[in-house]
Image (cartoon, coloured by chain):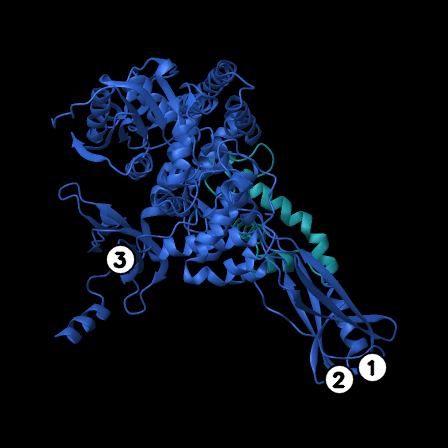
Chain colours: A blue, B cyan
């Protein structure tokens, strides 16, 4: 092991990430030395008045675990915090980090938890100081900051809070225990149920937030698959006027009977109409509220198509580069203490924001704020620091969105005008023409890149002017079925229902994909997803109950602010867990049967590529060779003599396109790997491939 | 026990406590029946068979609705 520098009596600062440790070192002193001990980078400030050793964790170093390892044993309540390296053997690096921090703690006289100031960060720092440093509580301090700028970090270290066990850490630890207890016990019941009916338990799980989230998707899909559309009709007229022809819509948007539609056509076509009214309505559009995590994720999905987890990871990079404030926040508040003026001046030094900054610097800076608050952080805002390194394309896009949103909240109201021209035909029928225009752009000048600014003008007609209804077009339409969730809208739904936290929502969605409960960007539940939800709803409703999970979230929030105790909340959880285990255990055989069928169906759903073009009876299915471990395609009718088979690409995820090759009739697959997704016919003897080969020769 | 008595008339799922379908096809069957009146009024005259055929052909309708509609036509 590398040697520990010969100093003592220092303050050991624990950060969450490597970049944050370096920024904190820079903020505390211009002169620091960097050493590497056992693979861990540490920064040392050794001055007579200031002695710091700054090191970083790698996220969580400890994780909850149990000594009852067998996957079908339950209930499990004997939980303990273990080094993550003991739970996940591949994380040996974690053990090295724990050892290094432990050694450094021997010569420390005080400890600062400088991990991100939120529930997760407080929990990470709490566990490290408690289990790796074994520190005396009177020597433990907490640093509170929302940006990694030098100024804010210096202030945070001048005003350290005493103590380790704050509400955030208590809430974080309680959340971990609840989720672990709920998840491990119920998942083990499901695994046991499967083992009862099959040789293996498979990869099956549920969780406190996972169950209700999956239920949203299943309920939406049920609605879509059992949707019966309704017909309706719309009428549109081609109108001739002194100012030229234009289209007008009938005053009733939804005509519910076909004969009524055609009566409107008969009674209007070729008739003279009169411009009766020109209505103008001015609408005030307030500036948007500052971004919290959910709002940023939704907006980045709407504009750039970034998944919520991608947005969060890009935002983390921007935060670690000190370009934006902490991105995991519920707050829609922008306190004056962040110094608006300084930030705007800073941004004005960047050419692309110079014009906007100049406009704002001549205004009174009062932000529009939303209602949501967060005790730990304000909303997400740019720090005003200039990027020292180039941002990649995605970072650049997200940064621009955050900057422009920040500018917008200081903007004035925008005023739009909606205009409606009304044309009467024989005192019985009315037609309308709609237009819209911007009267005063207000905040839109900062955010125009990201909003629909299209304008529609009206024909310049006067009231009383005569027009001709030249023709009327009746269109039959049908109600659209509800849309499927995508990652963005699902995240929005979870947020609306207060399911999970800003830090965990995106991760839970990814778990649903990993478990093969859901598929596709436009999210569809698999047979397994359907069955898990149906089974859990049937035998233990509370597991998928949104209300129960929401109630739990609200109790956790109360722990954060000291209005609830972890003991009370854990007692409720243990009681509910035992109740659900009982309900499921009483039906274990039935549950096993249902899940086994669903697993089999999901396996086929995922691996069947289409009908076999050779025997026309079997299906082509992806098979992995036991001998070589390689995947290939074969026919399910093999036992009856069909020998159709072909090799498959060994890298990437294979998706069925549902299409057949026009040359040979074999299925076309889509391969998603590191490169751009590509389509190919899986028949290695396909004439199209021979043609390509010949072409190359 | 006869398997037909315990499984849905359309899919392999278990039959719901009422009717001949599983829980999901039952919902679709209910929706088909509930919406017939609206469709009849919308088109002035529309027979039950013609309605079922439209449900099968219209792409907005859900897959389970189409399956139930096909089943009801075949059964007749």
Residue at mark 1 shares a chain with residue at mark 3: yes
Q: Quadrant of the C terminus of chain A?
A: bottom left
Examine the rendering and report whether any part of residue A64 can be seen.
no
In this figure, which residue is indicated by the disc labeled 1? Answer: A465
Q: What's the residue at 27%, 57% (across, down)?
A: A615
The answer to whether A325 is drawn above or below residue A375 in the figure is below
Q: What's the residue at 35%, 52% (across, down)?
A: A387
Residue most extreme to the front: A48
At which x and y percent is residue A254?
72, 62
Q: CA distance from mark 1 to mark 3?
A: 62 Å
At which x and y percent is residue A383?
43, 46
Query: Quadrant location of residue A678?
Result: bottom left
Which label is found at residue A241? 2
Secondary structure, mark 3, is loop
The answer to whether A550 is drawn above or below residue A526 in the figure is above
**How many discs mark residues in the rendered view?**
3
Q: CA distance from mark 1 to mark 2?
A: 9 Å
Secondary structure, mark 1, is loop
Examine the rendering and report whether any part of residue A691 can be seen.
yes
Between A136 and A611, the one lying in front of the other is A136
CB contact under 8 Å: marks 1 and 2 = yes
Q: Chain of mark 2?
A: A
Residue at mark 1 shares a chain with residue at mark 2: yes
Residue at mark 3 shares a chain with residue at mark 2: yes
Q: What's the residue at 49%, 18% (across, down)?
A: A573
Secondary structure, mark 2, is loop
| Dot 2 alpha-carbon crowd within 10 angstroms: few under 14, some 14 to 19, many 20 or more | some
At which x and y percent is residue B3?
46, 35
Query: Quadrant location of residue A178?
Result: top left
| Dot 1 alpha-carbon crowd within 10 angstroms: few under 14, some 14 to 19, many 20 or more | few
In this figure, which residue is indicated by the disc labeled 3? Answer: A675
Q: CA distance from mark 3 to mark 2?
A: 57 Å
């Amino acid at each position: 092991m590398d040697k520990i520098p010969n100093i003592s009596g220092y303050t050991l600062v624990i950060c969450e990430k490597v970049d944050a440790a370096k920024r904190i070192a820079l903020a505390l002193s211009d002169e620091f030395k960097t050493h590497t001990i056992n693979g861990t980078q540490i920064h040392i400030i050794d001055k007579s008045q200031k002695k710091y050793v700054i090191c970083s964790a790698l996220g969580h170093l400890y994780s909850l675990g149990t000594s009852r390892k067998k996957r079908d044993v339950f209930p499990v309540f004997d939980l303990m915090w273990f080094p993550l390296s003991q739970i996940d053997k591949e994380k040996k690096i974690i053990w090295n980090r724990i050892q290094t921090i432990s050694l450094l703690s021997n010569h420390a006289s005080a400890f600062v938890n400088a991990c991100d100031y939120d529930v997760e960060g407080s929990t990470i720092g709490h566990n490290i100081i408690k289990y790796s440093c074994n520190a005396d509580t009177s020597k433990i301090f907490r640093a509170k900051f929302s940006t990694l700028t030098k100024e804010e970090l210096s202030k945070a270290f001048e005003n350290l809070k005493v103590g380790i066990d704050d509400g955030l850490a208590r809430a974080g630890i309680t959340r971990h225990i609840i989720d672990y207890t709920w998840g491990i016990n119920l998942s083990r019941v499901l695994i046991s149920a499967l083992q009862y009916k099959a040789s293996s338990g498979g990869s099956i799980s549920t969780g406190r937030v996972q169950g209700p989230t999956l239920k949203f998707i299943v309920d939406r899909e049920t609605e879509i698959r059992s949707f019966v559309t309704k017909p309706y009709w719309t009428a549109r007229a081609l109108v001739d006027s002194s100012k030229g022809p234009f289209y007008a819509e009938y005053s009733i948007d939804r005509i519910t009977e076909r004969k009524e539609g055609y009566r409107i056509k008969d009674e209007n076509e070729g008739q003279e109409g009169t411009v009766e009214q020109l209505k103008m309505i001015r609408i005030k559009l307030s500036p948007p509220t500052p971004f919290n995590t959910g709002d940023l994720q939704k907006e980045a999905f709407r504009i750039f198509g970034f998944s919520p987890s991608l947005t969060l990871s890009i935002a983390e990079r921007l935060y670690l580069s000190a370009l934006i404030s902490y991105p995991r926040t519920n707050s829609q508040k922008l306190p004056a203490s962040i110094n608006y003026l300084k930030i705007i001046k800073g941004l004005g030094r960047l050419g692309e924001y110079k014009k906007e900054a100049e406009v704002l610097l001549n205004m009174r800076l009062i932000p529009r704020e939303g209602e949501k608050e967060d005790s730990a952080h304000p909303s997400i805002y740019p720090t005003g620091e200039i990027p020292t390194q180039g941002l990649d394309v995605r970072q650049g896009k997200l940064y621009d969105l955050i900057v422009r949103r920040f500018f917008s909240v200081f903007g004035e109201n925008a005023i739009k005008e909606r205009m409606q021209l009304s044309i009467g035909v024989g005192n019985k029928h009315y037609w309308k023409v709609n237009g819209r225009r911007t009267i005063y752009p207000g905040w839109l000048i900062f955010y125009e890149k990201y909003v629909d600014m299209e304008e529609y003008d009206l024909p310049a007609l006067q009231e009383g002017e005569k027009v001709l209804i030249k023709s009327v077009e009746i269109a039959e339409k049908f109600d659209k079925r509800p849309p499927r969730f995508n990652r963005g809208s699902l995240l929005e739904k979870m947020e609306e229902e207060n399911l999970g936290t800003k830090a965990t929502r995106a991760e839970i969605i990814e778990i649903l994909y990993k478990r093969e409960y859901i598929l596709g960007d436009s999210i569809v539940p698999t047979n397994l997803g359907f069955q898990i939800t149906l089974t859990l709803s049937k035998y233990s409703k509370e597991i998928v109950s949104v209300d129960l999970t929401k109630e739990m979230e609200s109790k956790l929030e109360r722990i954060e602010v000291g209005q609830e105790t972890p003991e009370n909340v854990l007692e409720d959880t243990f009681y509910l867990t035992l109740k659900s285990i009982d309900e499921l255990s009483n039906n274990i055989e039935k549950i096993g049967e249902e899940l086994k069928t669903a697993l089999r169906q999901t396996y086929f759903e995922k691996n069947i590529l289409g009908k076999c073009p050779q025997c026309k009876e079997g299906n082509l299915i992806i098979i992995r060779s036991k001998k070589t471990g390689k995947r290939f395609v074969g026919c399910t009718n093999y036992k009856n003599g069909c020998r159709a088979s072909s090799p498959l690409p060994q890298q990437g995820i294979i998706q069925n396109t549902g299409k057949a090759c026009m040359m040979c009739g074999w299925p076309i697959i889509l391969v998603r790997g590191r490169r751009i997704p590509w389509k190919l016919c899986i028949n290695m003897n396909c004439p199209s491939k021979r043609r390509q080969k010949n072409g190359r020769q | 026990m006869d398997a037909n008595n315990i499984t849905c008339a359309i899919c392999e799922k278990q039959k719901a406590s009422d009717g001949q379908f599983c829980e999901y096809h039952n919902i679709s069957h209910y929706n088909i029946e509930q919406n017939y009146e609206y469709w009849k009024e919308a088109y002035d005259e529309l027979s039950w068979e013609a309605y079922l055929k439209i449900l099968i052909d219209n792409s907005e309708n859900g897959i389970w609705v189409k399956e139930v509609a096909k089943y009801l036509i075949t059964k007749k």
